[in-house]
Image: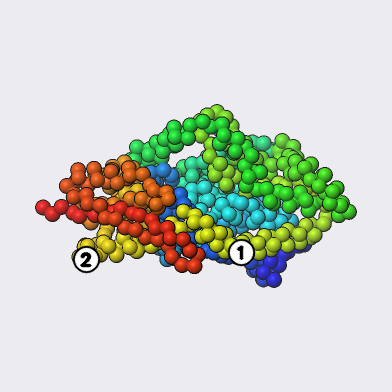
Amino acid sequence: MLLTLPLKNTRSSLPRPENPTLLFGIWGLLGLHVLVWLAAYSLATANLDSYGDMLETYAWGQSLDWGSAKHPPLFAWVAGLWFDIFPTRDLFYFLLSYVNVAIGLLGVYRLAQALRLPHLAWPGVLLLCMAFPYSTLAAKFNANAILLSIWPWVAVAWLHSMRQVGRSGWLWSVALGVLSALSMLGKYYSGVFLLGIFLTALMSKEGRQWFRSFKPWLAFFVFVLCLLPHVQWLREHHFVTALYVDEQRAIDGSNAQPLLRFLIAPFLYWPLPWLLLAWFVAPDHAGFLQRLRGLPLRMVRCWSPKGWDDTLFWLAVMPWLISLVFGLSGFVTMSVPWAIPIGFAFSLLWLRNLTADTTDLPRLLSQLRNSLLAWCILVVFLSPLYALYKGQTGSEKFYLPRREAAIEILKGWHERHPSQTLRWVGGAWPENALLAFYGDSSIHVEPGVPDQFPATVNPLPNWSQQAGLLLCPMGSAQQPAETGCVDRMKVWLQAHGQQAEPIHISVQKQGLLFPKQIPFSYIAFDYLPVRP
């Protein structure tokens, strides 16, 4: 069976390769999770995310620079290396998203063992498979999603650095430094998580003893060493990411509503596994009404600590609590998607608290396995129905013809300039990246125009001597875009001695899933090098 569960396995390490049943079990579960959500998004959607985050990530990943105009570089590096191997297709982008999730889930499995709770490894992963950050929300591969795969492994490295001695302890300390640096290179929000680990270590005698050893200082030295190239890049680019943070704070305005939404993030992102676990751990003899009456109390018990030195409790709640403190201080404007990675240890905390008085873990595992299978079947069954619904209702995001636009725009370029190779595309960021992702991956994507901020970050060398194209998506007849992009491109082209003649393109999606005729318009401008 694909989901064969090691119901009686309580060893503190992963099953050895000579036990193929157990080894196939965890990999089978992760493989099933990836395949189910890959199928779901292939059946349910006709585009990447509508906000263009994944196109933006792809564009930044074209060069392995140490930063971008908004974020540190890790998730862009991953995307860039991924598409050096795989074709630039939506299917393979979603595959990247859920491979990233699988790495994080394996980290949670290892975390349970590092916490000396190996019997909770399987149910902990099963529960997280049904949480939104690891299922529906994980499809968008961006700076938030990359933390799903890193944070659990940082926690694993910290626990092993603290508890193992000799050479193994030193190696895990080096790993802690490297992984902590990677988490910061994923998103600066990881600073909250690393602060949480620091405070969690102070809460226990074991952690305080660790601070008296040389191992945390080794980890810190490796951490700083790994971040030095990024810091140097920031200095060279005038700390552009800090400017982006300030701009977002000015745009977002009031922090009250985002802070409230972040406060209730566990209710928004993890309701299904939380409710299921609290329901299943009721006494065997309890009837429906008795289970229902005891449900609120069991849900509250999920969050109870076992004292001030409860490492699992603090590891689970510290990122959440510290984020709320920063939000209350007004230092940052909270964003609910930041909560996506914070719950990696939630399921282990809930299980520890609710199963302490029961020995019937096999029954709970069976219930969670059956729930996950039902969840997977439901997801795959509803996905094509969702696509049909979007097609019938004429959803603008569903009908967005990115691939069709890229093909038509490149076809027009080759007809106009058969001897000119298109080297770069600018214009409306990040939607202009569709030309590289869906059309020709050798085209360099510029965030705007090549010689203006923020395009000064990672510009194409000698762009002025190479042919380019400026792209302005104009939306559909029902939801036309503003003309600001067109006006800006005309002004810029005229300033650079170009004719600024607009090229109009109209494309639409066709097929059984797209019964409505919804054309989308694009305006392009050619940039041709001025010959001396």
Q: Which residue is mark 2?
A: 418
Q: Position of residue 512 (x, y in %)?
A: 49, 67
Side of 370 where 247 appears, left or right:
left
Q: Position of residue 292 (x, y in %)?
A: 81, 47
Side of 381 where 391 appears, left or right:
left
Is residue 400 at all visible to an observer of this figure? yes
Picture layout, residue 140 above or below residue 250: below
**Quarter of the N terminus within the rendering:** bottom right
Residue visible at 56% across and 31% down in the picture: 256
Determine contact: label 1, label 2, CB under 8 Å.
no
Side of 60 where 293 appears, left or right:
right
Residue visible at 71% across and 46% down in the picture: 349
Q: Earlier in the sequence, mark 1 or mark 2?
A: 1
* Residue placed most toward the observer, 159 or 446: 446
Say which mark, if any, is on residue 36. Answer: none
Q: Which residue is mark 1?
A: 380
Question: Which residue reaches farthest top?
Answer: 329
Image coloring type:
rainbow
* Residue placed most toward the observer, 122 or 15: 122
